[in-house]
Amino acid sequence: MLAQASTPALVFIGFVIVQRLAELWLARRNTERLLARGAREVGAAHYPLIVALHTAWIIALVVFGWTAAVSLPWLAAYVLLQGFRVWILASLGARWTTRIIILNEPLVRRGPYRFISHPNYVLVAAEIIVVPMVLGLVWVAAAFTVLNAAMLAVRISKEGAALAPLR
């Protein structure tokens, strides 16, 4: 017997997918503009692995979450994270991108960047956990948290070395 789709789960997953696609569009636009201003990319070799990781995460949400009941407490946590996302995006403005783009200008020190060196990575790490938990997918949250931590170790190392002269 085929499981019945959960409309709330499908709406939630659809929202996450549309949000990620919109972020990729914004990131591409910002990256092109930054490069046109003389910025340079660092760590491009690992970027396809990040894309693959996040694509696999989305596929796991779709494949295993489309029939799930939505957890309201976890959904509330997700909504709170979106406020953090807006704060991050507003703080970085045209300098926000999904790639490591180094612009020879002072680093942003407003918004969450006053308190945390990498707030966007904190946000993504939290979402890697919270989004699957909205759908009760504990194993997806656990597996992708481990994979994301390994990826962030590489990424933060590359980014830190590239930004060191600007600090």
Image (cartoon, rainbow, N blue to C red):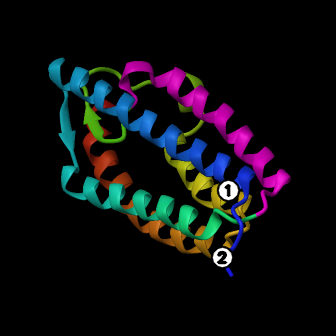
Structural distance between the alpha carbons of marks 2 and 1: 27 Å
Q: Is residue 19 left or right of residue 100?
A: right
Q: Is residue 7 left or right of residue 89?
A: right
Mark 2 element type:
loop
Residue drawn 43% across and 39% down? 21
Q: Amino acid at mark 1?
A: Val
| Count of marks overlaid on the render | 2
Residue at the image position 27 percent from the left and 53 percent from the top: 47
Asked whether 139 or 61 is in front, the reply is: 61
Residue count near mark 2 (Cα–Cα under 10 Å), binned few <14, some 14–19, many ≥20: few
Which amino acid type is shown beneath numbered disc 2?
Leu
Look at the image and tell me in which quarter the C terminus lies.
top left
Magenta stretch bounds: 69-96
Residue 102 in magenta stretch:
no
Residue holding disc 2: 2
* Residue 28 drawn at (x, y percent): 29, 32
Image: 125 above or below 68: above
Res 138 → quadrant: bottom right
Dot in front, 2 or 1? 2
- Quarter of the image with the N terminus is bottom right
Q: Main secondary structure of the magenta part?
A: helix
Element carrying mark 1: helix
- Residue denoted by label 1: 130
Between residue 20 and residue 49, name the one nearer to us: 20
In the current view of this chain or complex, which residue is farthest to the front? Answer: 1
If you read the primary sequence from the N terminus, does the residue marked by circle 2 or circle 1 appear first? 2
Q: Position of residue 16 (x, y in %)?
A: 57, 45
